[in-house]
Amino acid sequence: MTKLVAITKDNFSDKAWVRNPGYGFASSLATVPVVAAELPSLVPAMPLGFVRNGTTYDLVAICSLHPSTNLFVAPDGRWLGSYVPALLRSHPFRLAKIPGQENSILCIDEESGAIASQGIPFFDASGEPSREIREMLNMLTQIERSGIATQAAIAALDSAGLIQPWPLKLRQNGLGDTAVEGLYRVDEPALNALSEEAFLKLRGNGAFAIAYAQLLSMHQLGLLQRLDQVQAELKAQAEAQLSVLENLFQDDGTITFTF
């Protein structure tokens, strides 16, 4: 459960945070929201798609076709891909709107376990935000700005009728193919058939960058299958190691060594 709390000098001047080196917190995320600024790094690294968010869509990196599963996160929390989406890299920090204020404020997930008495300080000795906190605020501010532009571009694609359901199938051993629900993609034939008027309307707002990035990234779907195999191998290795450890211990608590 996420519980965001604003980082203020009154509440955090004597506190610190501990950087989590792993991504176990994201192990159940089948999709991760991303923004247009990440596209150059995302396209060669992960398949992209869209998911419904109320009356509009979000651009997402697809981490698995299995629900509540992230194939990019190893059992020990390591990230198995070549690029980590910014939303995950900024964990457990978020920007949030405060009622009555125009600008967003930096918050941290109070339930993340990252807040401590020792570690990276939130504020320096002079009472100013520490360098690490300023860097995180700058990163999240850039994500927020790109997110606004991303949503405008997606809305334009939607208005032009260029987003359609993605008819994906998931092959499960012994169970046949199962339809994957909830993912959307760019309608490439409709994109290529745009009228000159519709083309010019989309050209100036970054919509084409998102459209072509999504189409190109579809070639990364095969990566999910390879990661599925990697996950099975990692699981088998972990089970084998556990079996070895269990065999070392006898029922009476003694340890047996074999040579």
Image: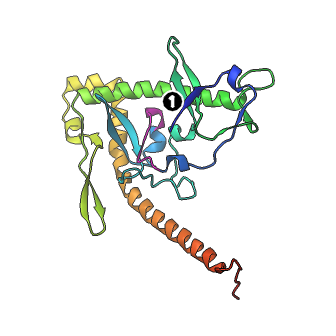
Residue named by callout 1: 143
Residue 196 percent location from the top left of the image: 21, 26
Residue 156 or residue 169, whichever sits in front: 169
- The residue drawn where x is 27% and y is 47% is 181
- The residue drawn where x is 33% and y is 30% is 154
Quadrant of the image containing the C terminus: bottom right
- Residue 22 vertical placement versus 254 (above, below): above
Residue 162 percent location from the top left of the image: 24, 34
Q: Is residue 89 part of the magenta span, yes or no?
A: no
- Residue 121 vertical placement versus 78 (above, below): above
Give the side of residue 6 with respect to residue 41, left or right. right
Considering every residue shown, the one lying at the far top of the view is 100
Give the side of residue 150 with respect to residue 193, left or right. right
Residue 174 percent location from the top left of the image: 27, 69
Give the side of residue 218 with respect to residue 135, left or right. left
- Residue 134 vertical placement versus 63 (above, below): above
- The residue drawn where x is 63% and y is 41% is 113
Q: Quadrant of residue 194?
A: top left
Residue 136 percent location from the top left of the image: 62, 31
Instruction: For mark 1, give the secondary structure.
Output: helix
Residue 228 or residue 111, whichever sits in front: 111
Mark 1 Cα shell of 10 Å, populated few (<14), some (14-19), many (≥20): many
Q: Is residue 31 part of the magenta span, yes or no?
A: yes
Region of the chain picked out in magenta, as a range: 28-38
Q: What amino acid is labelled 1 in the image? A: Ile
Q: Quadrant of residue 161?
A: top left
